[in-house]
Image: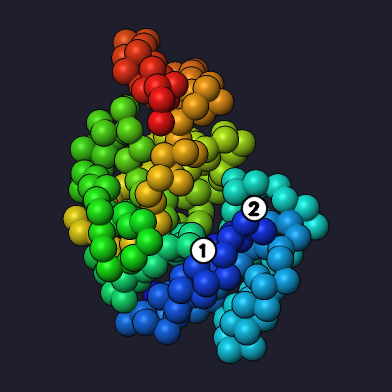
Amino acid sequence: MKFSVLMSIYYKEKPEFFNRAMQSIWDEQTVKPNEIVLVQDGKLTDELYESINKWKKKLRNILKIIPLERNVGLGDALNIGLQNCSYEIVARMDTDDVAKADRFEKQLGVFESSDIDICSSWVGEFDNDENEIVSYRKLPQNHEEIIKFAKKRNPINHPAVMYKKSAVQSAGGYKKMMWFEDYYLWMRMILNGAKFYNIQESLVKMRAGYGQLERRSGLKYAKEEFKFYKEIYNIGFLNKNEFFINIITRIPIRIMPK
């Protein structure tokens, strides 16, 4: 089963993180991707260009680079990258995370044996040392459980997801929804009839720590979260009670001191 890996990189990424991510999805994988689509979201640093060029020389046609003249944001960058993916099965990967060696093998096995459109897994979060996992983000396994969970929290770990390109595009692809582009996509895919599954083990090590807390708090984040929940209420994923429960329980936490 042939598949693409979809990545987006911008100028704030650290070259050493990007190199580690690439090692994990190519050098260390038991099943290697047929292509890696890397969207350069705007102008990058000289150090990042140097790292990317080294991987291009190594992988040649396997690595497909899509340069964008200006930074368009993750959602738009991923839509552009998805259009350039050659295969129906697409695995997402962030440029600062680390995939476990059997990630792709296990996810492809699910697609081969099950009638699903999207498959993710748990993720292990680390701060500085990838071998020191400080927490796991565990998610329900089967479709009906995932839908129920999605009423309150994001039911798919985006850095570990593998999906059918056609199912994502049929639901409208990634859309503008700051910090919630992936969650918004999953909700529209569910409403569109896509079938979900989560592998019950961690297949990706994700950088977290205090930096992630900084990004997920504050008044601006609270406003964007309110906007997101209002939108998924408007499209019919939440009823009125579910909408108000989310607002009452989640928004105050965002504006508390970090």
Question: Dot 2, how many residues are within 10 Å of its Cα: few (below 14), some (14-19), or many (20+)?
Answer: many
User: What's the mark number on residue 77?
Assistant: 2
Answer with left or right where residue 23 lies relative to residue 139: right
- Residue kind at label 1, given as amino acid type: Thr
Q: Looking at the image, how many numbered discs can be counted on the residues?
A: 2
14 or 74, which lies in front?
14
Residue depicted at x 26% and y 39%: 146
Q: Is residue 88 above or below residue 47?
A: above
Where is residue 136? Give x, y as percent. 24, 51
Q: Which residue is under mark 1?
A: 95
Q: Is residue 203 above or below residue 254?
A: below
Dividing the picture into quarters, in which one does residue 152 lie? top left
Looking at the image, the residue that sits furthest to the bottom is 58
Answer with left or right where residue 216 lies relative to residue 157: right
Secondary structure beneath disc 2?
helix
Closer to us: mark 2 or mark 1? 1
Q: Is residue 89 above or below residue 169?
A: below
Dividing the picture into quarters, in which one does residue 201 lie? bottom left
Residue depicted at x 64% and y 88%: 57
Residue 101 visible to the viewer: yes
Where is residue 104? Give x, y as percent. 35, 71
Secondary structure beneath disc 1?
loop
Residue depicted at x 37% and y 49%: 209
- Residue kind at label 2, given as amino acid type: Ala
Assess whether mark 1 and mark 2 are in contact (beta carbons under 8 angstroms): no
Looking at the image, the residue that sits furthest to the front is 257
Question: Dot 1, how many residues are within 10 Å of its Cα: few (below 14), some (14-19), or many (20+)?
Answer: many
The C terminus: image quadrant: top left
Residue depicted at x 32% and y 40%: 155
Where is residue 172? Give x, y as percent. 57, 41
Residue 227 visible to the viewer: no
